[in-house]
Amino acid sequence: MKSPLRRGLALVAGLSLVGTLVACSAPAESADTDGFAKDENTLVMGMVPDQQSVESNFQPLVDYIAAKTGKEVELVQSTDYAALVEASIAGRIDIGNFSGFTYVAATNGGAPLTPIGVTVTSEGAEPGYESLTVVPAGSDITKIEDLKGKKVCFVDPGSTSGYLYPSAELLGAGIDPETDVTPVFAGGHDASAQKTAQGVECDAGFVEDAVVEVTGIADGLFAEGDLEVINRVTVPGAPLVVSTNLPDDVQQSLKDSLQNITIDQIAAEGIEITDAFRAFFTELVPVEDSYYDSVRKVCEETGAAQCQP
């Protein structure tokens, strides 16, 4: 069954980003910013609201970008995925760490973005990561088909591994993700994993692999063994994107500085590598827009309203 998913991104006024992206739905400022979201000395970096501590997870990359460009990098975490999409469309992002789904949704809406590269999470691996279906330890749920009628934790309607791909998995099992389960939107991968481990609000949940296997345990959100994985699906890797509003020389400088970087190169700059960053990042490899055609295909299969501008 492939009924359309009706939950949209709610791209309406009032959504905001913390920090400098408040009121991101407002028109782009007329001040002379030369294509920058803020000014020529600053790069505004938008982040999806995935983790308990964005700073801990991504600060090494932020520090590296600042070191290579000589610009201040303002790291801002969106209130939700929809806010990040809206901010991108409004031209208030210079660079960002997006999910594949967020990138597709933003560019479908006219956001001036292009991918610099895609994150590789472990040495020798292909770009990408996994969307895991998890249940509390000891659950009698053992397969996707068992989720019918259950309370299911999703991350956010705009999450690639926490909603879009899980929706496709459910539809493939004959389960409508809107009507055949009770959806609970946790707001982040960490919260989805934690709520599922607790087994009160959610009988099962969808979470990216690194949270289940590394960071959720390290952050004390749940103990090793509290969650059982009943399904795995490979998802296209998260893109690092750059605004095409930026001056050509700045865009090229960012690409030259960031494409093919490794975690060792970042450390060689004297930048402290956090355990959380190491769990998500080994290197960044170049990628074309067409790499995300598989996300577009899943959009077509699910009829997800989030894919539309």
Image (cartoon, grey):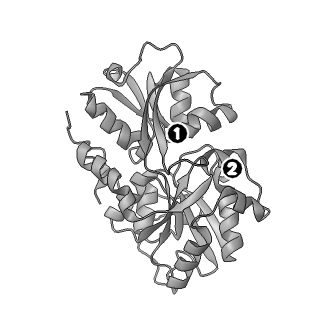
The residue where tag 1 is placed is 189
Q: Confirm whether residue 33 shows in the render.
A: no
Residue 65 is situated, as x and y percent measured from the top left of the image, at 65, 68
The amino acid at mark 2 is Ser
At 32% from the left and 26% from the top, the residue drawn is: 181
Where 267 sits versus 183, above or below?
A: below
Secondary structure of the residue carrying tag 1 is helix
Image quarter hosting the N terminus: top left
Quarter of the image for residue 149 reads: top left
In terms of sequence position, does the residue under pointer 2 or pointer 1 come before the other? 2
At 64% from the left and 44% from the top, the residue drawn is: 279
Image quarter hosting the C terminus: bottom left
In the depicted view, which residue is nearer to us: 90 or 12? 90
The amino acid at mark 1 is His
| Distance from the alpha carbon under mark 2 to that under mark 1 | 15 Å
Residue 111 is situated, as x and y percent measured from the top left of the image, at 39, 68
Q: Are marks 2 and 1 in contact (CB under 8 Å)?
A: no
At 63% from the left and 27% from the top, the residue drawn is: 222
Mark seen at residue 56: 2
Q: What crowding class fits label 2: few (fewer than 14 Cα within 10 Å), some (14-19), or many (20 or more)?
A: some
In the rendered structure, the answer to whether residue 242 lies left or right of residue 213 reads left
Secondary structure of the residue carrying tag 2 is helix
